[in-house]
Image (cartoon, grey):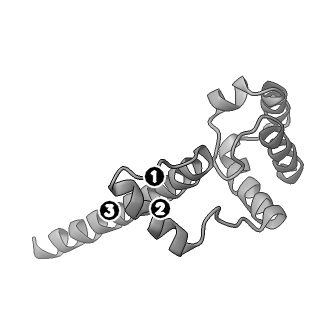
Amino acid sequence: MYKEFAEELYEICIKNDAHPNKWLTARELAKLKGGPGLIAKLKKNKGLLSELRPVYFDYVNSITKYQSCNTPDQWACKFDRWLFNEYEFTPKEVDELQADRIRQIRRETSQKVTNWKNVWERCKQNY
């Protein structure tokens, strides 16, 4: 069921010039042409956006075999120039950096939760 919704969401993103590797919240999706219809169909089929998300990214990755807009060396040079106010990132580069930043924040958050669990277990053992 979710694969068809993933395909439709991808088409909506492309038609509305939204970066396909950036997840859209329900509010952001509702503002795009075709977004409210997708949300309504998903709700009618008793689906959830949270369950669509992994299927959507699997679909996007399989379709686009996503490539960065820059090589690692290009990113390094652009960051160096940016630090000295000699370069301004393009909107496409900013979108890619934002998507990567969000993914890193989620990873750090899950590690913090795991660390707290370890601390709690050690505290219970000591007392």
The circle drawn on residue 78 is 2
Q: Which residue is mark 3?
A: 112
Please say if 40 is above or below 88. Answer: above
Residue 24 visible here = yes
- Quarter of the image containing the C terminus? bottom left
Disc 3 is placed on an element classified as helix
In this picture, residue 53 sits left or right of residue 93:
right
Q: Residues within 10 Å of mark 2 (few under 14, many from 20)?
A: some
Q: Which mark is residue 96?
A: none
Crowding near pointer 1: few (<14 within 10 Å), some, many (20+)? few
Instruction: Tell me the kind of residue under disc 1.
Output: Tyr
- The mark tally for this picture is 3
Q: Depth-wise, is mark 2 or mark 3 nearer the camera?
A: 2
**Residue at which label 1 appears:** 87
At x 72% / y 49%, what residue is drawn?
Answer: 20
Vertical placement of residue 3 versus 121, above or below = above
CA distance for labels 2 and 3: 31 Å
Residue lying furthest left: 127
